[in-house]
Amino acid sequence: MDIKAFVLSKAKEAREGARSIAKASSRQKNAALMKMAEALGKRSKELIRENAKDIVFAKNKGLSKAMIDRLALNEKRINEMAQGLIEVAALPDPVGEVLKMWQRPNGMTVGKMRVPIGVIGIIYESRPNVTADATSLCLKAGNAVILRGGSEAIHSNKAIVKILRDAARTEGIHEGAITFLDITDREAVMELLKLEGIVDLIIPRGGEGLIRAVTENSRIPVLKHYKGVCHVFVDRDADLKMAEDICFNAKVQRPGTCNAMETMLVDKKIAKSFLPAMIKRFKSAGVTIKGCPETGKIVSAIGTAREEDYYNEYLDLTLNVRVVKDIDAAMEHIAQYSSSHTDSIVTKDYSKGMRFLREVDSSAVMINASTRLNDGFQFGLGAEIGISTDKIHARGPMGLEELTCAKFIVLGNGQLRK
């Protein structure tokens, strides 16, 4: 079977799975998710063994430390995957929820109801946990999922999918609801993107190059974010100890993620009192600092931030630092360089915090919190399928509700159009 025929057969199987899972009860879906979580825990050694093959491949291929970190599985990350499934099972089922109803003068009642989207294709790189997260959310929202991970995670993803399908089958879930493209040829992705009418939505997760390639070639609607250029602004009225802890966490806790801080903005009025200790702490954690000229006057032995650096998503222990005049200058910087992903202000001034919330146009805007908290699990969504910076249909972490759409429902008693 050639690649085109292979992908088409997989997509048709997913379409059958979508029709089946759309009718599944909440009890059936929840039971399947709980079985999946239990199975991941019981078979963790198997997952780690398969993941080790991918780690060797990634190192031989010369992938970056950030990419290898995203790829790696250990007991903690497997437990987090399982916990994500449990959290999704505990969430209210959005399918069938009636959003609102109203009555027309002719006596008919009109309403809107949440329904599954159908077949969702997930194209992603490195992170094997996406396999479990995407599956759990799609299934709970009544969708079938077609998973296409990167070649660097092929062994990990095969193992995870087998475990999930085995567990789901015990609860009568149609196997097509969890479909995996288990070939690494890039042509498979191009063929998948042509299947309008069979696949309803594509969600790419990965680097900017992957997302742009998917968007440019897809005949199917795409939900996306190109990159995460996130900021923390330390205001003159900030609690400086809090600001130091927030900025450190936003950059260092896991730098290879899209919600890690890439530029720290500091109000000029407190820069001299804040930056020396803050940069010393960053350096002790191995962070390379690129500073503006004003930062260089306050702290020596740092690199120089160039104009193009402010657009960078480093996904590594590199940070831009810029001293700004005030909150207006900070928001002007964010408006120019931000990717509209996540931006935060540290301040004790209520009015400034409220201005920042209103005027910064990003998928998540925060006051006195680390950008690393923009995450479906942290927001109580159970898990997320990605963080969208689009403005149509879904924005921010995409949980269950974002994986449904609405249809109109009409209750009549014989009304006719005149």
Image (spheres, rainbow, N blue to C red):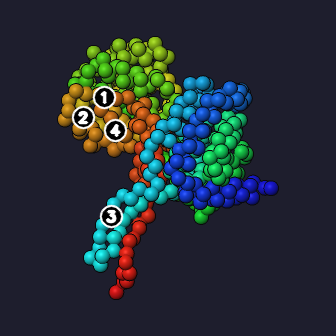
Sequence-wise, the earlier of marks 3 and 2 is 3
Identity of the residue furthest to the bottom in this view:
418
Q: Is residue 144 left or right of residue 344?
A: right
Amino acid type at circle 2 is: Gly
Residue at figure coordinates x 41%, y 66% from the top left: 408
Q: Is residue 203 left or right of residue 46?
A: left
Amino acid type at circle 3 is: Met
The residue where tag 3 is placed is 101
Residue contact between numbered discs 1 and 2, judged by CB atoms under 8 Å: yes
The CA span between labels 3 and 2 is 37 Å
Badge 3: few (under 14), some or many (20 or more) residues near its Cα, within 10 Å?
some
Amino acid type at circle 1 is: Asn
Residue at figure coordinates x 60%, y 57% from the top left: 20
| Badge 2 element | helix
The residue where tag 2 is placed is 353
Q: Is residue 291 above or below residue 378?
A: above
Label at residue 196: none
Q: Nearer the viewer, mark 3 or mark 2?
A: 3
Q: Quadrant of the C terminus?
A: bottom left
The CA span between labels 3 and 1 is 39 Å
Q: Is residue 97 left or right of residue 62?
A: left
Residue 97 image position (x, y, % from top left): 41, 56
Q: Nearer the viewer, mark 4 or mark 3?
A: 3
Residue 215 visible in this rendered orientation of the protein: no
Residue 330 visible in this rendered orientation of the protein: yes
Residue 154 occupies which quadrant of the picture?
top right
